[in-house]
């Protein structure tokens, strides 16, 4: 298999910096070269600051792919899914490039991001930069342990990376990002029992609750989706909390060999079931952005830069 970007299946880190960018340069070859230079920069920082466990991912927006890499297209590349029900929606804020930097040192994340922005210069416009951090023992700012059901070890490769069914893009990954904003003040008005009822998990150790003690559409159940053959549709989450004293939330990042698991999960959360139930956690958090990307393999990036 072509060499994937190291950051796709990397272990959890203490810090992250997410860059969302739009490209304003019509020189597609120049951008392909710069994308290759960015992966080289990430590799350099990984070697220079090896103790910080630096990893990175650069992914191409679904609408920008055709410009920067004309010709071959990942088989399932598609725009961010348009899903809405009642007053719940998943807004789209499309962008051309998504860069994820992760490390165990915040200063190294910042330094690498500065180098990348200097490299890209006035060829891009920065939409936003979000700084993520590990919170306590891997919890979301709601106080619940986050994504402890993520695939482990070699299983990550099967879940997150495109395989032989699309050989031109083997080693790549479909990425979706959303910036969720939590209403922490409203959330904290609930008792622990009420929070657990909504989440479907124990707050102390994340153990599952029995059906008698959880919502019929708990957040945990809504994010565990299956296909028409009742087979689990899994993805790899790389999300991290972000925030300050004014705004708190979760920057959601998922990687998968297909965009279908994310789309099914999003629909499962937002859409009413036959009883009018939905993921009640959405009464306490809302997505403010959403975008779809493809992160090609390092092999693909370097070949196309020539």
Image (cartoon, rainbow, N blue to C red):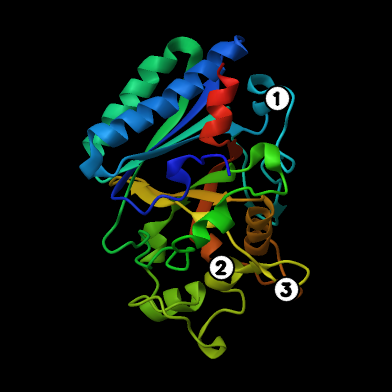
Residue of label 2 = 280
Task: Residue 279: give its label.
Answer: none
Q: Which residue occupies 39% across, 16% down?
A: 119
Q: Which residue occupies 53% across, 71% down?
A: 220
Q: Earlier in the sequence, mark 3 or mark 1?
A: 1
Residue of label 1 = 66
Locate residue 144 relative to residue 156 in the image: left or right.
Answer: left
Q: Secondary structure at mark 3?
A: loop
10 Å crowding of disc 3: few (<14), some (14-19), many (20+) = few
Q: Which residue occupies 40% across, 26% down?
A: 40
The Cα–Cα distance between marks 2 and 3, rounded to whole angstroms, is: 24 Å
The Cα–Cα distance between marks 3 and 1, rounded to whole angstroms, is: 34 Å
Quarter holding the N terminus is top right
Q: Name the one closer to the observer, 156 or 192.
A: 156
Q: Position of residue 226 (x, y in %)?
A: 68, 68
Q: Position of residue 305 (x, y in %)?
A: 55, 19
Q: Secondary structure at mark 1?
A: helix
Q: Is residue 35 above or below residue 172?
A: above
Q: Secondary structure at mark 2?
A: helix
Q: Earlier in the sequence, mark 1 or mark 2?
A: 1
Residue of label 3 = 230
The reply to whether residue 229 is visible in this rendering is: yes
């Amino acid at each position: 298999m072509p060499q994937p970007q190291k950051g796709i299946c990397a272990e959890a880190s203490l810090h992250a910096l997410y860059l969302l960018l739009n490209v304003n340069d019509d020189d597609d070859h120049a951008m392909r070269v710069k994308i290759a230079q960015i992966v080289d920069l990430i590799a350099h920082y990984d070697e220079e600051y090896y103790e910080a466990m630096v990893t990175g991912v650069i992914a191409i927006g679904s609408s920008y792919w055709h410009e920067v890499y004309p010709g071959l297209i990942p088989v399932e590349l598609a725009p961010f899914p348009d899903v809405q029900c009642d007053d719940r929606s998943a807004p789209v804020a499309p962008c051309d490039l998504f860069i994820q930097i992760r490390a165990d040192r915040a200063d190294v994340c910042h330094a690498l991001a500065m180098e990348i922005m200097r490299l890209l210069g006035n060829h891009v416009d920065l939409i936003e930069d979000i700084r993520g951090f590990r919170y306590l023992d891997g919890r979301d700012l709601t106080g619940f342990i986050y994504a402890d059901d993520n695939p482990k070890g070699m299983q990550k490769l099967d879940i997150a990376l495109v395989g032989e069914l699309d050989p031109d893009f083997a080693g790549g990954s479909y990425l979706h990002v959303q910036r969720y904003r939590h209403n922490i003040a409203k959330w904290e008005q609930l008792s622990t029992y009420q929070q657990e009822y909504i989440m479907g998990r124990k707050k102390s150790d994340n153990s599952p609750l029995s059906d008698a003690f959880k919502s019929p559409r708990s957040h945990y159940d809504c994010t565990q989706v299956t296909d028409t053959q009742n087979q689990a549709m899994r993805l790899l989450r790389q999300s991290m909390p972000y925030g300050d004293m004014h705004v708190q939330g979760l920057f959601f990042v998922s990687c998968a060999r297909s965009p279908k698991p994310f789309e099914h999960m999003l629909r499962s959360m937002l859409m009413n079931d036959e009883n009018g139930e939905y993921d009640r956690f959405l009464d306490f958090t809302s997505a403010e952005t959403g975008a779809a990307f493809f992160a090609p393999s390092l092999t693909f990036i370097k070949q196309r830069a020539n």
